[in-house]
Amino acid sequence: MARTSRTASRTASTWRNWAGNVTARPVREVTPASAGELAEAVRRAAEDGLKVKPVGTGHSFTAAAATDGVLIRPDLLTGIRDIDRAAGTVTVEAGTPLKRLNVALAREGLSLTNMGDIMEQTVAGATSTGTHGTGRDSAATAAQIRAMELVLADGSLLTCSEKENADVFAAARVGLGALGVITAVTFAVEPVFLLTAREEPMTFDRVTADFDALHAENEHFEFYWFPHTGNCNTKRNNRSAGPAAPPGRVSAWVEDELLSNGVFQVACSVGRAFPAAVPAIAKVSSRALSARTYTDIPYKVFTSPRRVRFMEMEYAVPREAAVGALREVKALIERSRLRVSFPVEVRTAPADDITLSTASGRDTAYIAVHLYRGTPYQAYFTAVERIMTAHGGRPHWGKVHTRDAEYLAGAYPRFAEFTALRDRLDPQRLFANDYLRRVLGD
């Protein structure tokens, strides 16, 4: 039986990530239905001398999940295991997409405190790469974790929390897939609440001049700057006593589907074919979205559909450096021949205590740059990366960057703590791949 499975797995198709820039051809794929089956797959891979990598929905732009060994698909490791209302926690299987988790929690009258703007990722994939939203006081998805369960390189099952295996817990919440394969995550949750979203166009000069005040006055503040223009779109999300007042069906479709996806897709396609037209298109696009205010439950406010495929690089810089770094990016684009069709996104997060979180130990601002898929991005991203690293930037673990272990060891004060733990938990580098060798060393 095992021989048949092994033979069949050798014909596994090539795996590709969402953006299409990363491919991998594993020796075999495994889809375990339990932590026990996953542990057995890890032990068997070690016996066969093969590396192991779990893969979620492929929303990382890096090769963090790529392997030529055993690819673990978590499709059957989904659903809520337990809800503890007294403790305010929910334990969920690692392969559960965030979308399904959010819907299930809402049905139970519960919610995460904060979340990113995309919810297609799996729980394990999102937390392992440091997925985040924006928040003055509430931090990234991984900072809401209260306990984790993972299979280690020796096939054993380990649980960790602040009270149990605390050293592993400090690192594994943003573990890059380097410490083990996550099987379950316990999140802090709270009774579902309402958020009022206020979206409003604002000039670049005003939003940068008032950035500190806008951050301080709002629980969740973010903005998008449209390159080749002086225009931004801002979003302020704050808790509300209600009542709920979601966008009308027609207006929501116009804003979120027609303009943000349909028309934007066409604009990006035209810009890719005719780069000289990008500045003119940007001026029109930046004026297309109008001010609006609505109130709804969290995941319907925090998240939005993203159907236009792109390449992305994002850096975390000290929050006090955000405006200066962004102004440098603007000056870069204005003095160059670059034609940038995608807005530049700016978000924030408070400091957290996770070893390799991009907000570890410092209040943080995130600056993300994108280009439409199929558009040459290297020159733009390289120039922006030079600006971000000059400000002590930390690259998002799941987005395009060129940093290596030497740079990252200087950017993260606790970097050696993480690599020492990796040496202990995975001395044979069962969970290694080319990306981890670059960013963590060997």
Image (cartoon, rainbow, N blue to C red):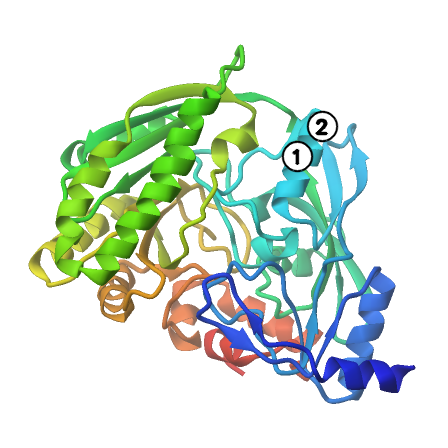
Residue 287 position, x and y percent, is 21, 33
In this picture, is 155 found above or below 304? Answer: below
State the separation of the CA atoms marked 2 and 1: 6 Å
Q: Residues within 10 Å of mark 2 (few under 14, many from 20)?
A: few
Residue 296 position, x and y percent, is 52, 22
Q: Quadrant of the N terminus?
A: bottom right
Residue 161 position, x and y percent, is 72, 50
Question: Would you name the residue on which mark 2 appears?
Answer: 107
* Residue at 36% over, 72% down: 402
Under circle 1, the secondary element is helix
User: Could you tell me the amino acid type at mark 2?
Assistant: Arg
Under circle 2, the secondary element is helix
User: Could you tell me the amino acid type at mark 1?
Assistant: Val
Say which mark, if any, is on residue 103: 1
* 371 relative to 183 in the view: left or right: left
Q: Nearer the viewer, residue 107 or 19?
A: 19
Q: Which image quarter: residue 264? A: top left
* Residue at 38% over, 30% down: 254
In this picture, is 234 found above or below 355? Answer: above
Furthest residue in direction bottom, as rendered: 49
Task: Tell me if label 2 and label 1 are in contact, CB under 8 Å.
Answer: yes
